């Protein structure tokens, strides 16, 4: 089973002025990520505005990223991974999306806690039990702020006992919970990988034993974040700390008025394909734009 580690980009979905998907822009972003040394790509995550994409649009995006990464790996001898967002608050649909990720050749499927329904712990366990049977490595996505439900460490311990559950994208916002997961889950399953879902917590989590980050800011600065993560992986925490504190203003600015609205605005400022967001998301407020622009300048990006 593949081991999850390194810097992954939770990719945005660029849009054209008429609101349609900018597939050529997406292709350019994939190439940019690969050239900058990213370890993995995550299409169809939250940052990709997946709730507003049709399944046809989703499959067209997958038919760009998967062959592009495959060809890149073949030419360079590298092993960039593709993790495919496959979550739903309907277990039947989640199983179908995970099966699609497997059939199309993804390395991992990212499955978020069922949202809105607010199931009990037993319901969440059975949800992950169902997707685990598909037979592709599954990464659990714990983000209470978007789902209304935190996956406690005791529940994650049960989920980690299931076949094909290989790690967690931890976006609870609690470094204490992340460390508890490493203490209790990783000690039992040494190959279980804890990835930060919060750019600003990457350094402390990796110092505590985390394996990397599934990042938003890497949409714009994949090289710098990959360097930070690789420094941590190599035990060069003094070097990683320099990058961490350099980027603190941008970490904050990237979420000052919603995601992916802010990172898309930042990418537009830098001339990277991004475009607008689809309703119900809207562009950042004018004061947020100033904060983002100031952070780009302050961080020297």
Image: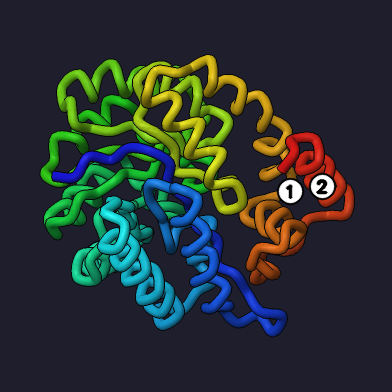
Q: Which residue is drawn at 60% across and 82% down?
A: 20
Where's residue 34, x and y in %? 44, 56
Of the numbered discs in the image, which one, if any, rests on residue 211? none
Where's residue 202, x and y in %? 49, 29
Q: Residue at x 33, y 55 (%)?
A: 83
Q: Which element carries disc 2, helix, strand or loop? A: helix
Q: Quadrant of residue 246?
A: top right
> Which part of the image, by quadrant, shows the N terminus?
top left
Q: Name the residue under label 2.
A: 293
Most foreground residue, 299 or 153? 299
Most foreground residue, 59 or 297? 297
Most foreground residue, 290 or 255? 290
**Number of marks:** 2
Where's residue 35, x and y in %? 47, 55
Whichever of labels 2 and 1 marks the residue nearer the N terminus, that label is 1
Crowding at mark 1 (Cα within 10 Å: few <14, some 14-19, many 20+): many
In the image: residue 151, left or right of residue 24: left
Q: Quadrant of residue 16?
A: bottom right
Where 259 sits versus 238, above or below? below
Where's residue 268, x and y in %? 73, 62
Where 158 sits versus 86, above or below? above
Q: Which residue is drawn at 88% across and 54% down?
A: 286
In the image: residue 200, left or right of residue 96: right
Most foreground residue, 265 or 260? 265
Crowding at mark 2 (Cα within 10 Å: few <14, some 14-19, many 20+): some
Where 95 sits versus 296, above or below? below
Structural distance between the alpha carbons of marks 2 and 1: 13 Å
Q: Mark 1 points at which residue?
A: 257
């Amino acid at each position: 089973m593949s081991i999850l580690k390194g810097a992954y980009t939770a990719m945005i979905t660029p849009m054209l002025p008429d609101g349609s998907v900018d597939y050529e822009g997406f292709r350019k972003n994939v190439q940019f990520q690969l050239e900058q040394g990213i370890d993995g790509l995550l299409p169809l995550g939250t940052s990709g505005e997946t709730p507003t994409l049709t399944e046809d649009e989703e499959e067209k995006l997958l038919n760009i990223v998967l062959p592009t990464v495959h060809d890149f790996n073949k030419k360079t001898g590298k092993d960039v991974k593709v993790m495919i967002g496959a979550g739903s608050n309907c277990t039947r649909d989640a199983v179908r999306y995970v099966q699609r990720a497997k059939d199309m050749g993804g390395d991992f499927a990212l499955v978020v806690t069922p949202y809105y329904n607010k199931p009990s712990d037993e319901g969440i366990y059975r949800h992950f039990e169902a997707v685990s049977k598909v037979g592709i490595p599954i990464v659990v996505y714990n983000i209470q702020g978007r789902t209304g439900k935190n996956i406690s460490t005791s529940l994650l311990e049960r989920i980690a006992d299931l076949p094909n559950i290989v790690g967690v994208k931890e976006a609870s916002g609690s470094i204490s919970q992340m460390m508890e997961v490493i203490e209790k889950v990783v000690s039992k399953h040494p190959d279980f990988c804890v990835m930060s879902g919060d750019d600003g917590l990457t350094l402390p989590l990796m110092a505590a034993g985390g394996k990397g980050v599934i990042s938003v800011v890497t949409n714009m600065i994949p090289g710098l974040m990959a360097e930070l993560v690789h420094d941590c992986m190599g035990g060069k925490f003094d070097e990683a700390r320099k990058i961490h504190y350099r980027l603190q203003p941008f970490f904050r600015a990237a979420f000052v008025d919603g995601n992916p609205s802010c990172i898309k605005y930042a990418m537009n400022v830098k001339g990277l394909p991004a475009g607008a967001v689809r309703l119900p998301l809207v562009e950042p407020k004018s004061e947020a734009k100033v904060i983002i622009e100031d952070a780009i300048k302050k961080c020297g990006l």
